[in-house]
Image (cartoon, rainbow, N blue to C red):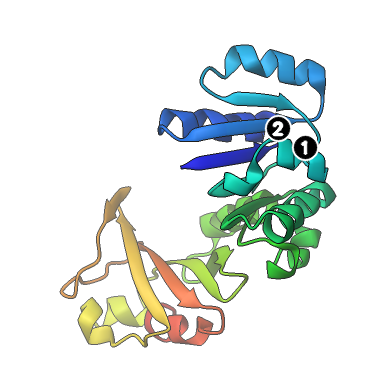
Amino acid sequence: MRVVVAGGGSVGTAIALDLIDRHHDVTLMEQRSEIADKLRSVLPGVTVLAADACEYASLSAADVRNADVVIAATGDDEDNLVVSWLAKQEFGVPRVIARINNSRNEWLFNESWGVDVSVSTPALITSLVDEAVEVGSIINLMDLANGKMRLIEVTLASNAPAVARTLTLDELRLPDSVRVVAVVRSDQPLIPSATMRFLEHDHVILMARGDASQECASAFVA
């Protein structure tokens, strides 16, 4: 898969390293020429371009039109939105992923700006803090498909219906708008099955439609 990463900071560099280890064809664009020069020596296998990814000409020179994925990973939300919009609208990139630096800007990162998937580091950290203190609450981990779907987590309390009534996943009769995708029990990830029963302190990871919080609550929150 051909991936273009915009931004040669710590986040963009880490992404590029991980992708090249997974045998993808990676191009990294960094506006500061002195940083780009250094990155060439520390990112073997990655094509590093000293170019401004917010400019049409730079993206064209990077052959973004033939990219499978563009990742806007700079430390500036405005830049990430511009890169996303150009990648989607001008070059027709199939999948655009954008980094959100300031959670107040999260509402902007949608399909209108060419963003297929947004990743908010502040929101993710906040959700992890919530997770540490909120047993029995629904924690939003990530919005997907422009907010139409959500990846959420619930840490089960002893009085959660699924635990108190010792129901199997099949017996919970969850609606089509909700799917259990994983369960973490005693630090071990488990693949859910129809006969799985839930225990107190299970971390249940669900994929749910954006408006399906109540359906999740009915089974997993007291």
- Front residue of 163/81: it is 81
Residue shown at the point (43%, 28%) measured from the top left? 21
User: Residue 131's x, y, as percent?
Assistant: 53, 58
Q: Is residue 106 left or right of residue 172?
A: right
Q: Amino acid at mark 2?
A: Met
Give the answer, above or below, for where 126 lies relative to 58. Answer: below
Q: Quadrant of residue 81?
A: bottom right
User: How many residues crowd around disc 2 within 10 Å: few (fewer than 14), some, or many (20 or more)?
Assistant: many
Binning the other alpha carbons within 10 Å of mark 1 as few (below 14), some (14 to 19) or many (20 upward) gives some
Residue 188 lies, in percent from the top left, at 28, 49
Of all residues, the one furthest to the left in this rendering is 195
| Residue for point 64% across, 34% down | 12
Picture layout, residue 21 above or below residue 187: above
Q: Which residue is mark 1?
A: 58
Foreground tag (1 vs 2): 1
Q: Is residue 116 visible?
A: yes
Camera-nearest residue between 45 and 154: 45
Residue pointed to by mark 2: 29
Question: Which percent across, then down, holds residue 105?
Answer: 80, 60
Q: Could you tell which of marks 1 and 2 lies nearer the N-terminus?
A: 2
Asked if the residue under mark 2 is in contact with the one under mark 1, i.e. CB atoms within 8 Å, the reply is yes
What's the residue type where badge 1 is placed?
Answer: Ser
Question: Which residue is depicted at the point 64% across and 16% down?
Answer: 40
Left of 82 or right of it: where is 162?
A: left
Residue 76 visible? The answer is no
